[in-house]
Image (cartoon, rainbow, N blue to C red):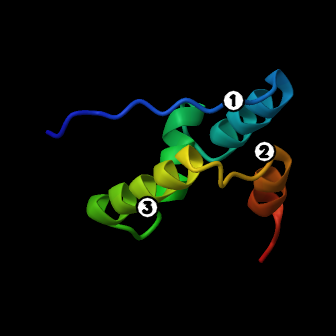
């Protein structure tokens, strides 16, 4: 099994509670498993790692978006 990478996400307590509630509503025991399932939908581990690398590089270069925009995107029906 490959080594695990630790990913830390800064969010408010209310945002955490909302994700935790969504996790339970969708049959997950915790928010981490739920978020991984969203990211892993129909993608291989290699594809996920490449996307992570690209995202990490963008974050290091200051190419980020506010968390509120992330929540809006997650909540959209598109």
64 displayed left or right of 55: right
Tell me the CA gap for discs 2 and 1.
8 Å
Q: Position of residue 64 (x, y in %)?
A: 69, 51
* Residue at image point 55% right, 29% down: 8
Tell me the CA gap for discs 3 and 2.
18 Å
* Residue at image point 81% right, 72% down: 77
Q: Are marks 1 and 3 in contact (CB under 8 Å)?
A: no
Tag 1 secondary structure? loop
Front residue of 28/73: it is 73
| Residue 67, numbered label | 2
Quadrant that contains the C terminus: bottom right
Residue bearing the label numbered 3: 51
Front residue of 17/3: it is 3
Tag 3 secondary structure? helix
Q: Earlier in the sequence, mark 2 or mark 1?
A: 1
Front residue of 68/58: it is 58
* Residue at image point 38% right, 59% down: 48
Q: Earlier in the sequence, mark 1 or mark 3?
A: 1
Q: Position of residue 32 (x, y in %)?
A: 53, 35
Residue bearing the label numbered 1: 10
Tag 2 secondary structure? helix
| Residue 40, numbered label | none
47 displayed left or right of 34: left
Q: Earlier in the sequence, mark 3 or mark 2?
A: 3
Quadrant that contains the N terminus: top left
């Amino acid at each position: 099994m490959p080594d695990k990478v630790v990913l830390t996400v800064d969010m408010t307590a209310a945002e955490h509670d909302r994700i935790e509630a969504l996790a339970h509503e969708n049959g997950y025991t915790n928010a981490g498993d739920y978020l991984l399932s969203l990211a892993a939908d129909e993608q291989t581990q290699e594809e996920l790692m490449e996307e992570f690398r690209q995202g990490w590089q963008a974050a290091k270069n200051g190419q980020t978006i506010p968390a509120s925009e992330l929540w809006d995107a997650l909540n959209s029906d598109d």
